[in-house]
């Protein structure tokens, strides 16, 4: 059993209607191509006869107790005996008879070989309109944009990979977003990835599919966002910070006339100063996310800016932050003196408030910088 080259892995949850035809096709593929392999069923709590049918046909069955598509596959990958694994749903929608291109690419050294249903062909009724023309293209586009990937079909369920290399990624998503997790983490770790055309036909089940469009679509999108801190935090943060700085500077000395009937004043400056605070915080979040990802081995390298931020000592953060705090205190004192000069009575908002807004903004940013330094210090603590 140690010399098994290929495991054909199928996650299973009540698939008695289609599991037999899938296993038979997989076995025929192995025999036809003279590949020493196994068919492994990762049963995720089936209450029908799926397991009995699989065992009768000669497939190996492992019970995966933790619920979820991702959990079933992670458990199955760990139990696989093959050097390579090709995974696919056992609903008879994927073609287990023609896996030659997958094994060919794996043998040539690719770590992950993705199927592409849009290139191979999607049969009528095999994929809903929303999935085919909206959901899959949109999420795949986001994946390519965020992670500089060349994969056109991020969510194809038929894919092959080098088992040892995939296990090193420490995949842990329990749900349908596991499909995105595998591609994203492989991209982040510079794995060799390619696509091969594959077909998709209408599945043979009479029950409803396990996939839930809105729930699982959001889980995919959420996963892509939280693993792309530049897009989730840095870009919107930088835009807000820039708008806030420009607006605050333009309005500090008075109103800004846009048209004869419309101008921006002190109230607008308050919003612009809020943009500075929010934008600055989002930028900080992006660096925190990158440092954390590096510390937990999600990514194997940091960009130059994040590396420099990571290596700045806590005392330097404290010094830089203190400059902003001191500036805020000075402006506050000036404002208090102005207030005292009118016996703490009413002040003209347009002349008094710009100083107060700038003072509070400077104080908040300074405190953010100081405590960000301590937080980076916490993340830099090496585990024993």
Image (tube, grey):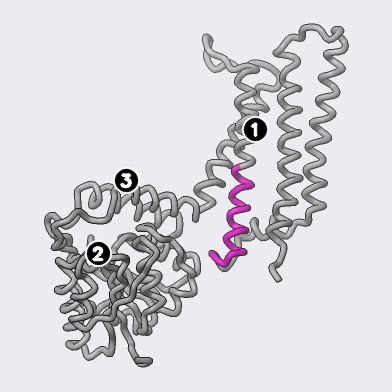
Q: Tell me which numbered mark, 1 or 2, is placed earlier along the sequence.
A: 2
Q: Residue 168: image x %, image y %? A: 49, 74
Q: Would you call the spot at circle 3 few (<14 residues within 10 Å), some (14-19), or many (20 or more)?
A: few
Q: Residue at x 65, y 17 (%)?
A: 266
Residue that carries the numbered disc 3 in the rendered image: 214
Can you say whether 353 is above or below 301 in the image? above
Q: Nearer the viewer, mark 3 or mark 2?
A: 2
Which residues make up the magenta segment? 282-299
Predominant SS of the magenta segment: helix
- Quick one: SS at disc 2? loop
On screen, residue 340 versus residue 118, left or right, reads: right
| Picture quadrant where residue 61 is located | bottom left
Can you say whether 99 is above or below 382 in the image? below
Q: Residue at x 36, y 74 (%)?
A: 76
Residue that carries the numbered disc 1 in the rendered image: 245
Disc 3 vs disc 2: Cβ atoms closer than 8 Å?
no
Q: Is residue 361 magenta?
A: no
| Picture quadrant where residue 360 is located | top right
Disc assigned to residue 333: none
Query: Gap between marks 3 and 1, in whole Å?
Result: 38 Å
Can you say whether 150 is above or below 131 in the image? below
Q: Residue 41: image x %, image y %? A: 28, 74
Disc 3 vs disc 1: Cβ atoms closer than 8 Å?
no
Which image quarter is the C terminus in?
Answer: bottom right
Q: Pick whichever, 29 or 58, lies toward us.
A: 58
Disc assigned to residue 47: 2
Q: Residue at x 70, y 61 (%)?
A: 380
């Amino acid at each position: 059993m140690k010399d098994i080259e290929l495991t054909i892995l199928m996650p299973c949850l009540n698939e008695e209607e289609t599991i037999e035809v899938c296993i038979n096709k997989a076995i025929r593929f192995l025999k036809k191509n003279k590949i020493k392999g196994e068919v492994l069923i990762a049963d995720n709590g089936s209450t029908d006869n799926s397991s009995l049918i699989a065992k009768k046909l000669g497939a190996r069955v492992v019970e995966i107790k933790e619920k979820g598509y991702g959990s079933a596959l992670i458990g199955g990958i760990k139990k696989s005996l093959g050097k390579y694994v090709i995974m696919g749903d056992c609903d008879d929608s994927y073609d287990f008879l023609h896996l030659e291109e997958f094994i060919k690419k794996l043998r040539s050294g690719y770590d992950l070989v993705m199927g592409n249903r849009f290139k191979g062909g999607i049969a009528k009724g095999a994929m809903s309109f929303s999935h085919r023309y909206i959901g899959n293209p949109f999420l795949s586009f986001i994946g390519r944009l965020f992670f500089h990937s060349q994969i056109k079909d991020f969510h194809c369920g038929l894919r092959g990979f080098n088992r040892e290399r995939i296990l090193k990624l420490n995949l842990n998503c329990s749900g349908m977003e596991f499909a995105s997790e595998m591609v994203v983490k492989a991209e982040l770790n510079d794995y060799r990835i390619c696509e091969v055309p594959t077909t998709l036909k209408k599945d043979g089940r009479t029950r409803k599919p396990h996939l839930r469009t809105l729930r699982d679509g959001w889980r995919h999108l959420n996963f892509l966002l939280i693993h792309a801190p530049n897009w989730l935090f840095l870009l919107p943060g930088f835009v807000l910070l820039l708008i806030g700085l420009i607006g605050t500077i333009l309005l500090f000395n008075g109103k800004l006339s846009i048209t004869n009937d419309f101008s921006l004043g002190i109230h607008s400056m308050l919003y612009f100063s809020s943009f500075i605070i929010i934008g600055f915080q989002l930028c900080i979040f992006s660096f925190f996310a990158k440092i954390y990802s590096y510390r937990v081995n999600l990514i194997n390298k940091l960009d130059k800016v994040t590396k420099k931020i990571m290596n700045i000592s806590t005392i330097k953060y404290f010094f830089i932050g203190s400059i902003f705090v001191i500036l805020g205190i000075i402006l506050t004192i000036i404002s208090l003196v102005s207030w005292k000069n009118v016996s703490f009575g009413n002040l003209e908002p347009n002349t008094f408030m710009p100083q107060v807004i700038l003072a509070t903004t400077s104080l908040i940013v300074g405190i953010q910088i100081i405590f960000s330094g301590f937080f980076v210090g916490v993340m830099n603590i090496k585990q024993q």
